[in-house]
Image: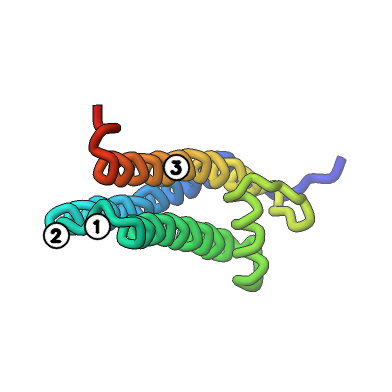
Amino acid sequence: MIQIPHTSILAPLAVGMLGQGCTFIIHLLPVRATINLVRREKDLGRVGTPWIDLGIFARVVFYASLAHLTEIAFWGVLFKICGEFTDFGTAFYHSAVNYTSLGYGDVVMTPSWRLLGPIETETATLLFGVSTAMLFAVMLWLIQARFVDLKD
C-alpha cells in the first residue's frame, strides 16, 4: 500500500471555517450598502418612478454580484496560500466552480485540502440565499412604494 502524505482533517476544517467567516464578513458589505441605498432613496423621495426604481434594483444586483466575485477571488487566494495552485487564474476558476456548485471536476485539489471545496460551496449556497432575500426585499419595497394599494 502506498502512503500518501496528508494534512490532518483539522487543518482544512480550521482554514475552511476561517474562510467561511471572512466570506460572511465580505458579504455584509453589500447588505449594508443596500440598506444605505434604500434609506437614502426613501429620504430623497425618489422611489416610485420606473427608471429610478430600475436603477435602485440594478445597483442592488451589482452589489450582490460584486460581493460574490470578491468572495470567489478570496477563496482562490486561500487555495493559493494552501499551496493548491501555482497561478491565480486556475485558483479563481476552481473557486468559481466550487462557489457555484458546478463541480466540473476538471481541476481537482489534493486529498489534503479537498475538504475546502464543499465548505466553500456550503458557504456560497447560504450567501446566494442572502442575496436572493436581499433582492426580493428591495423588489417588494419598490413595488409597495409605487403601488400603495399593494401595501396591505
Q: CA distance from mark 1 to mark 3?
A: 17 Å
Q: Quadrant of residue 152?
A: top left
Which mark is drawn over residue 134? none
- Quadrant of the snapshot with the N terminus: top right
Q: Secondary structure at mark 3?
A: helix
Drawn side of residue 91 relative to residue 62, left or right: right
Drawn side of residue 3 relative to residue 8, left or right: right
Foreground mark, 2 or 1? 2
Which amino acid, by three-letter code, is at mark 3? Thr
Q: Residue at x 54, y 46 (%)?
A: 120
Q: Residue at x 24, y 51 (%)?
A: 35
Which amino acid, by three-letter code, is at mark 1? Leu
Return the x and y of residue 41 as percentages of the image width and height.
Answer: 20, 57
Asked if residue 63 can be seen in this view, the reply is no
The residue carrying pointer 2 sits among few (fewer than 14), some (14 to 19) or many (20 or more) residues within 10 Å by Cα, namely: few
Q: Residue at x 48, y 61 (%)?
A: 74
Q: Earlier along the polypeptide chain: callout 1 or callout 3?
A: 1
Q: Quadrant of residue 86?
A: bottom right
Q: Secondary structure at mark 2?
A: helix
Mark 3, residue position: 132
Asked if residue 57 can be seen in this view, the reply is yes
Foreground mark, 2 or 3? 2
Mark 1, residue position: 37
Which amino acid, by three-letter code, is at mark 2? Leu
The residue carrying pointer 3 sits among few (fewer than 14), some (14 to 19) or many (20 or more) residues within 10 Å by Cα, namely: some
Q: Secondary structure at mark 1?
A: helix
Cβ atoms at labels 2 and 3 below 8 Å apart? no
Mark 2, residue position: 44
Q: Earlier along the polypeptide chain: callout 2 or callout 1?
A: 1
